[in-house]
């Protein structure tokens, strides 16, 4: 069972795209926040700003 868990964890470890600029996050300073990866703290802030704008539009 523990093995299965570690396997899942490994899969999760795969990096995706930056939540801020949408570029694939490779080895660049990974910034992990809220279940997503960002290249930098700035990208994370970018994403936050975007999310805020979306909220405004949605309402
Ligand atoms: Zn980025």
Image (tube, rainbow, N blue to C red):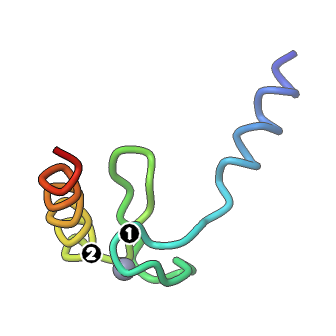
Sequence order check, earlier mark of 1 and 2? 1
Measured along the vertical axis of the image, is residue 5 above or below residue 29? above
Q: Which mark is residue 24?
A: none
Q: Is residue 54 left or right of 23 when viewed as pictured?
A: left
Which residue is nearer to you in this view: 15 or 53? Answer: 53
Quadrant (top left/top right/bottom left/bottom right) for the N terminus: top right
Picture residue at 12% right of the left edge, 53% below the top: 56
Query: How many neighbours does mark 2 have within 10 angstroms: few (below 14), some (14-19), or many (20 or more)?
Result: some
Q: Is mark 2 within 8 Å of ligand 1?
A: yes
SS label for mark 1: strand
Q: Is mark 1 within 8 Å of ligand 1?
A: yes
Q: Quadrant of residue 30?
A: bottom left
Residue 17: x and y in percent read 53, 72
Q: Is residue 22 left or right of 34 when viewed as pictured?
A: right
SS label for mark 2: helix
Q: Quadrant of ligand 1?
A: bottom left
Picture residue at 59% right of the left edge, 67% below the top: 16
Q: Quadrant of residue 37?
A: bottom left
Q: Are marks 1 and 2 in contact (CB under 8 Å)?
A: yes
Query: How many neighbours does mark 1 have within 10 angstroms: few (below 14), some (14-19), or many (20 or more)?
Result: many
Residue 21: x and y in percent read 37, 81
- What residue did someone put label 1 on? 38
Q: Is residue 11 left or right of 44 when viewed as pictured?
A: right
Measured along the vertical axis of the image, is residue 5 above or below residue 32? above
Residue 33: x and y in percent read 33, 51
- What residue did someone put label 2 on? 43
Q: CA distance from mark 1 to mark 2?
A: 6 Å
Picture residue at 21% right of the left edge, 66% below the top: 50
Quadrant (top left/top right/bottom left/bottom right) for the C terminus: top left
Residue 3: x and y in percent read 87, 27
Picture residue at 44% right of the left edge, 72% below the top: 18
């Amino acid at each position: 069972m523990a093995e299965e868990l570690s396997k899942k964890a490994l899969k999760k470890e795969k990096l995706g795209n930056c939540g801020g600029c949408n570029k694939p996050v490779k080895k660049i300073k990974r910034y992990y926040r809220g279940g997503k990866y960002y290249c930098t703290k700035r990208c994370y802030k970018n994403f936050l700003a975007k999310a805020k704008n979306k909220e405004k539009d949605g309402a």
